[in-house]
Each structure stands twice: as structure tokens, then as C-alpha cells.
Amino acid sequence: MITTAKFVLLLGIALVSWTDFLVTKNESGSKLEYTADAQLKLPEHYREWVYLTTGFDMSYSPDAMQMGHHMFDNVFVNPEAYKVFVATGTWPDKTMLVLEGRRAEGKGSINQKGNYQSGETMGIEVHVKDEARFPGKWAFFGFGDEKTAKMIPTTADCYSCHASHAAVDTTFVQFYPTLLPIAKSKGTLTPAYLKEAEAPAQK
């Protein structure tokens, strides 16, 4: 039989464990936060999130601007959203996808060929799903050296491009190798993407 003292002790242990869990979750930076003037706060611990993919010199335009150097783009998603996607093939409200740009380096240490990523980020973009805040449910935020960023206007090309070509819910899941098979199995791929995917076979 559990005495009152033992019960209080067990309850205390449980509360401490739950508090530790909440602190750990908060430290992962997966909470969507805005400033008073509607700027998005940079989720600084995004590199502790789920890694989805890395692109190399990717561009969605045939007339891409030449930067004079190569680029890596790393994509991370908050863990809560990832778990829902794995289960359903769709993104839940409060999803955050972080695209981190890093310059490609070719010479350094013992490297003789190929490229590796620089230690300094050249830009961060966050794609946020917040259904109550944004009329189109999703919004883009571009970060420079600041810890907060204003929403990129909906007139920007990124919105129309994602709406027209995204594989799942305005996101480019077609470039996320571990998630595309899930979307296929769940039947959540957009008609626009399916049409594009079938186009090469018709040529």
C-alpha cells in the first residue's frame, strides 16, 4: 500500500520529469512565435529538427542568376509536423519548414575534389503554415542577419510557384526523398504535380 509520503514523492518525481520534458521541447525551438508587429521569430534551434534533404545549385527558373559560386540548400522541419506527415501524408497547422543556404567550398583541408558546405549561412527562409493568420494558410519569411523577419508579400513569385508546382499542400515534397513515397502511398499528391510527373512519359 502506497503511503501518503510515498505518493507525494512519486508525484514530485513525475512533475519534475514532465517539467524537464517541456523544457527540452521548448529548447528545440519548435514553437511558432511572432513579435508584436507580426514578424516571425527565427527558430534558432532548427538544426535539432528533422532533416529532410539538401539541394545543390537548385533553381526553378531557366534564367537563374549566376552567383559565381555553388550553393547548398538544407531543409529541416519541426518534429511535430514531421510525425503528422509520416502518419497522414499531409502537413498539419503550425508546420515550419526551414531552408538554410550555405556556400559550397571546394578547397580546404585534405579535400581534393567535390564540394563541402561552408560554416556560415548565407540566408534562411522559413515556410510557415498558420491557417488562422494567413489567408492562404502558408507564408514565407526571409531572414538575413536578424532574428526576426517580416512576411514576404504574397505578390512574390515563391507563392505562385509553390501553388502551381508543389507536390503536397504548396510544399516541394517531390524533392524530399523520404517523404515523397509516403505522399504517394497516402494519396496526397496534388493533381498539378501528378500531371507534371506524367508529362515526360508522354513525350
Image (cartoon, grey):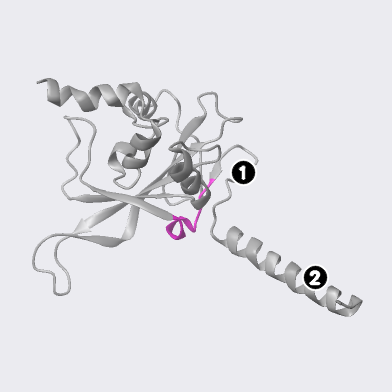
- Up-down: is 56 above or below 110? above
* Picture disc at residue 35: 1
Image quadrant in which the C terminus is located:
top left
Q: Position of residue 195 (x, y in %)?
A: 26, 21
Residue 149 is situated, as x and y percent measured from the top left of the image, at 50, 42
Mark 1 surroundings: few (<14), some (14-19) or many (≥20) residues within 10 A: few
Secondary element at tag 1:
loop
Is residue 200 shown in magenta?
Answer: no
Q: Name the residue at the right extreme.
A: 4
Disc 1 residue type (three-letter): Thr
- Nearer to the camera, 62 or 192: 192
Marks 2 and 1 sit apart, C-alpha to C-alpha, by: 37 Å
Q: Along the line of sight, which residue is nearer the eye, 97 or 141? A: 97
Mark with earlier residue (2, 1) = 2
Say the numbered circle drawn on residue 11: 2
Please report the bounds of the magenta region as a residue range. Answer: 41-49
Residue 80 showing in the rendered view = yes
Residue type of the residue flagged with mark 2: Leu
Q: Which numbered marker is on residue 192? A: none
Residue at 36% from the left image edge and 26% from the top image edge: 190
